[in-house]
Amino acid sequence: MTNRLAKITALAAISAISLTACGADGDKEASPSPSSSEATSAAASDASSATSEASESSDSAADAASFKPACPGGSISGAGSSAQLNAINQVISDYKAACSSATINYSPTGSGAGVKSFIGKQTDWAGSDSVLNKDKGEPDKAKQRCNAEPWHMPMAAGPIAVVYNVEGVKDLTLSTPTLAKIFSGAIKKWDDEAIKKENPSAKLPSAQIEVFYRKDESGTTDNFTQFLNKAAGDIWTEKHSKTWKGAGKGADKSAGIAQAVKDTKNSISYDEWSYATKNNLDMAAIDNGNGPVKLTGESAGKAVSAAKVVGQGNDLQLELQYKDTPAGVYPAVLVTYEIACSKGEDAGKTALLKDFLSFYASEQEQKKIQDAGYAPLPSDVASKVLASAQALS
């Protein structure tokens, strides 16, 4: 895994992402438990250690390479993106090893539920694979909740894999138009002429294609449908959304998608790369107009490097290129944001949140999450994210 991802650091020059989310209206707030057996850990140090380390951390506030946690103690909870779960689990575990007695909880409820719980003041921050959705009034709701501007901090970049389970087919290529037709239900069988043309050597069965999608509101769905709409808008005419509007059967969260495809012959779906690799799923190469591109650390890093900055100040939002990608660039990539109030929160919680998010952005932790299947932030971007986290007040 490390070898496949090692090239990302040099290639990925993330700048910023402006992906909107079509989450549910905030009139019915989700109520996820702030704790999770998969993503809960304790972390902190005693008061004297915190005091001595705080000044050292402050001196390296904008230096992701040398950041050291101050370990202020306390308790915070977050919820949202399951796409980042394997990454944030690693970071929480490492924070626990560095600090010993505060508590950090993260529940992988999905991006939509995570944003709702944050806006509803049920959590201290949200993890989301999309930025707050203006059409749903989410930025205004978050601003009211915070009595200040909410900030987006990109932490984990992960490609979206097209995963499939077809016996005897280990090298599958699908063009973006063909993908759009499969996921919209226009192509129903594996031996459809379009798939056969793109895979002349494959032994494709005359079997129904079993499509799976995320049934929960998901930033992965939002980003995948953004890709389909931008790259094949004449076929996938629906606007991007956290709620699936195509064909198929629903499965719960990233882990549920991986398990459904693993257990179902002739199936196909989309999932975050770390879940695809963890479950040893076959992944299709995508032809976005300039030849088939397999999902690798290098091809994903090239996609991330083309992102543009569209956020302002410490609100770090990014915009990815989905259409007309150059040869060798894997086009379906997402970035998970941590969304937090820029100021005005409880001082104790803010101290721990800024320390933990700064730790997440550190060079050491960004290298660690490569082994979990994520693209690390380039050093210049990591420094901006760390500076944003340190500016929380």
Image (spheres, rainbow, N blue to C red):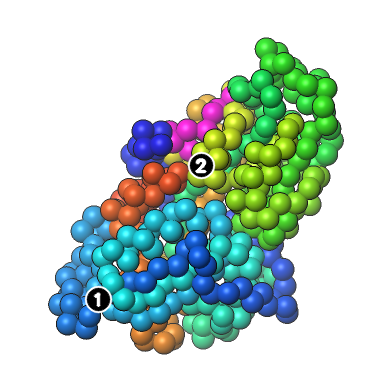
Task: Tell me which corner region of the image, top left, top right, bottom left or bottom right, holds residue 3.
Answer: top left
Which residue is drawn at the image coordinates 47% and 49% (left, top)? 157
Tag 1: amino acid:
Ser
**Residue 182: x, y in percent?**
77, 35
Give the extent of the magenta segment.
292-300
Front residue (pair 84, 342): 84
Dividing the image into 4 quarters, which one contains the N terminus? Answer: top left
Please tell me the numbered disc located at residue 45: 1
Identify the image quadrant of the C terminus: bottom left
- Please give the label number shown on residue 25: none
- Which label is found at residue 278? 2
Q: Quadrant of residue 271?
A: top right
Q: Compared to 387, does 318 lie above or below?
A: above
Q: CA distance from mark 2 to mark 1?
A: 33 Å
Front residue (pair 313, 61): 61
| The one of 222 and 322 positioned closer to us in this rendering | 222
Other-residue count near label 2 (Cα within 10 Å), few / some / many at <14 / 14–19 / ≥20: some
> Residue at 43% of width from left, 58% of height from top?
89
Residue 148 horizontal/vertical position (percent): 49, 82
| Element under disc 1 | loop
